[in-house]
Image: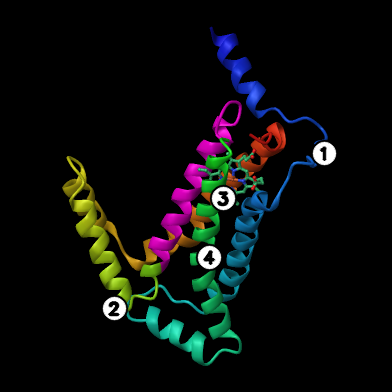
Amino acid sequence: MTTGVSAWVRERIRLKKSKPVPAHMTFFHCFGGLSFSVILLQLGTVIFMLFFYNPEPQEALKSIDYMSNEVVFGGLFRNVHRWASVILLAMVFSHMTIVFYFKAYRSPREFTWFSGVAQLLVVFLFITTGIILPWDWRAYWAFALWIDYIETWPLIGEYFSHIILDSFSINIGYFIHILILPVTLAVLLHLHFRMVRKHGISEPL
Ligand code: HEM
């Protein structure tokens, strides 16, 4: 039984040394790579912004205003980071829809799909924590909206929303946004790409 399960897992995660690019790759297979390119863009812009952003409630908006209006190229970096987050979501959704259409989630690519779902969740959390960081009115209402929404979850909603209200600060949001989520995404991307290498691109339907 154990051997059966471990053979099943090994067959899905062990890499072969070389893997030629298959001839059936099309435009539709670009979206995974495009999603990754936007992630790299986000990484580049965030490194710039780390030097100027201050995650204190009184300072957050001031530091962003300073960066956008006083620092050379600051506004450009900020806007690229904001817009690229929306583009990233669109790319990941397109990628997901396309691989779903191609039925690429089927055996043996179950782990590729599951790691993809987890990445989608991480991208979503990047956006929800990122919106809060400037701590302006939009951030305040986005936060309030989330708390209201979480409260409606059956059984755990009220409890969970209280935990967030009691423990949340911009500092924690910042820590999640620039450390926890990037590390989680890096691990998931590693698994995702490993799976793609292992199984190759799915055959046309
Ligand atoms: C951060 C987001 C993501 C990145 C950077 C990414 C990257 C990639 C890349 C580069 C490929 C190979 C080329 C391609 O088919 O496009 C791929 C394949 C794949 N991805 Fe993703 N992906 C992401 C999110 C997702 C999501 C959300 C899902 C589904 C829930 C998913 C499921 C898959 C599957 C099933 C394949 C295999 C496709 C095939 O064999 O035809 N990925 N991914």
**Which amino acid is tagged 4?**
Ile
- Quadrant of the picture in which ligand 1 is shown: top right
Inspect the image, locate mark 3, and give the three-letter code of the amino acid beneath it: His
Residue in front for this viewpoint, 152 or 63:
152
The residue nearer to you, when weighing 197 against 30, is 30
Q: Earlier in the sequence, mark 1 or mark 4?
A: 1
Q: How dense is the environment of label 2, judged by Cα within 10 Å: few (below 14), some, or many (20 and up)? A: few
Label 2: which residue? Answer: 137
Q: In percent of the image, x 27 and y 59: which residue is there?
A: 146
- The residue that label 1 is drawn on is 20
Q: Which residue is mark 3?
A: 95
- On whether residue 200 falls in the magenta region, the answer is no
Residue 166 horizontal side relative to residue 118, left or right: left
Q: For the residue with label 2, is its CB less than 8 Å from the closest atom of ligand 1? A: no
Above-or-below relation of 129 to 185: below
Q: Is mark 3 within 8 Å of ligand 1?
A: yes
Q: In percent of the image, x 44 and y 76: which residue is there?
A: 54
Position of residue 15 relative to residue 62, above or below, is above
> Which label is found at residue 87?
4
Q: Disc 3 on helix, strand or loop?
A: helix
Residue 114 at x, y percent in the picture = 51, 37
In this view, the mark in front (2 or 3) = 3
Q: Residue at x 60, y 46 (%)?
A: 189
Disc tally is: 4
Label 3, label 1: how far apart the Cα atoms are: 21 Å
